[in-house]
Amino acid sequence: MIGVPAPSSGAMPSGIIFCPALTDDSPTQSCHFQGMDAWAEAIVNPFGGNTVVCAGIGTRLISIDNFALCAGDSVTFTLNEGALPALVEGVDWAAGASNNDAAISLAIAVAAQAGISDAYVVGAGTDIFIVPELRTCEVGLAESDATCTTLTEDPNGSVFILSNIRLLGIADIITDADGNTRIETGIDDQIDFYPGGNRRLSVASFGVDIPDASAFFIGSSLDYGFKYDSAGTELRFTSTDCDGGGTDCNWLTLQDGTDDPIISGNLTASRGIFPSAASITGAGTDGVSVNFYTASQLRFGSTLTVGWSTLIVTDAMDIGLNRIAASLVGLTNGTNTNAAIVPGKNIAAAPTEPFTCDATHEGAMQYIDDTNDTNFGRVCICANQDGTGYDWRDIGDIVGTACPFF
């Protein structure tokens, strides 16, 4: 009822659209679109009625394809998110002796369904045309056997709101049938998202808030994500494959205090560039591995602090602009500024060259020793012999003594 005058008692009619009629040039008033109020003395049903806004329902059609294949088959309706009992052939309708017989029998059963105004067949046809009641907002169809029937569900219309929507107080927008997935606007300047009944995301004037233990995933397969763990006061970056075998882990953890950050597994890069004052710390030589691809540069600035008791480098490491920085004071070990620099070890019965000595590897060093004790252990360096060529030489006598790879 639209445009009716307000009741003299001041009470608004229940369950209608009510817009007060204007009799002069007074300011316009709001129109009310309201569900039915509860009965004032209600005990069993004291809740107010819902307000439902529906778009038009698209064509709903059931076609009989082959009556001979319909024995025991069923068609099920879902109306306004509620499933109705299945209509079973042989119980609620009969396939008969033709497709038209089956269509007419099924149409009679469909028309008797709650929420359906009519269902009919035109002439000797095999199509069942379905007419919903006015208060039915959705009609869903399901079949048990596609060889018996074909279902047609054309798209519904849409609800267009061409001006502002204002939600007052604690207002929820519910997006599923059981009501536990919703968008809530109960806090000023904030929108909360509750998928499955749990708050997972809030958007407010101060920014975006992801609650404790709520994961934020990247990609459709959910392979990578991050979440904050309040118990450990740490931000965790997760992966579903940390070892190449599908093992889940936190591949990066950002914590409060001195353990920030922690990397699980190896850090591998084709080229690593650190700031002018770089610091690497770890629980021990086995705590963290930093790997760089062969022939890559690991470049540090003028100051390099290494917190391990032993720094092991498996390939060439550049410090500063050149192989050796202009000013290298030495690697420190606690208060001992004379800590030893330990090159890679090549110990075997007959050690062989780790790689060919050439311009690319100039300056590389290895400690060489044979386990059969036919030669002394020594440190060898890949050196350019005054322009005559590159060779592995004994570091104690680069010019005169070749490095004995046994």
Image (cartoon, rainbow, N blue to C red):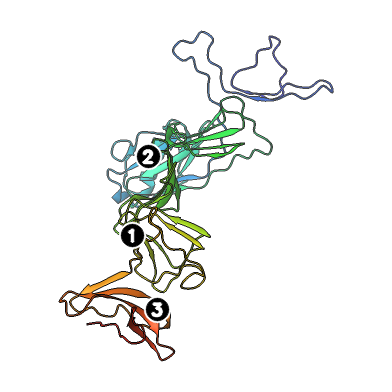
Q: Which mark is residue 310?
A: 1
Query: Mark 3 is on which residue type?
Result: His
Query: Going from the N terminus, do you reach mark 2 or mark 1 first?
Result: 2
Q: Nearer the viewer, mark 2 or mark 1?
A: 1
Q: Residue 296 appears at what percent x and percent y?
A: 43, 71
Check the picture and name the quadrant holding the N terminus. Answer: top right
Pointer 2 local density, CA inside 10 Å: few below 14, some 14–19, many at least 20: some
**Element under label 1?**
loop
- Mark drawn on residue 361: 3
Of 396 and 391, the residue lying toward us: 396
Task: Please name the residue shown 43% across and 88% down the image.
Answer: 386
Q: Residue shown at 35%/34% (left/top)?
A: 85
- Horizontal side, residue 154 vs residue 404: left or right: right
Residue assigned mark 2:
76
Which element is circle 2 on?
Answer: strand
Label 1 packing within 10 angstroms: few (<14), some (14-19), many (20+) = some
Residue in the foreground of this view, choosing between 357 and 191:
357
Does 158 sit left or right of 19 as displayed? left
Q: Nearer the viewer, mark 3 or mark 2?
A: 3
Q: CA distance from mark 1 to mark 3?
A: 23 Å
Q: Secondary structure at mark 3?
A: helix
Classify residue 111 as left or right of residue 134. Answer: left
Q: Amino acid at mark 2?
A: Thr
Query: Given the current orientation, which residue lies at the most extreme left position?
Result: 372
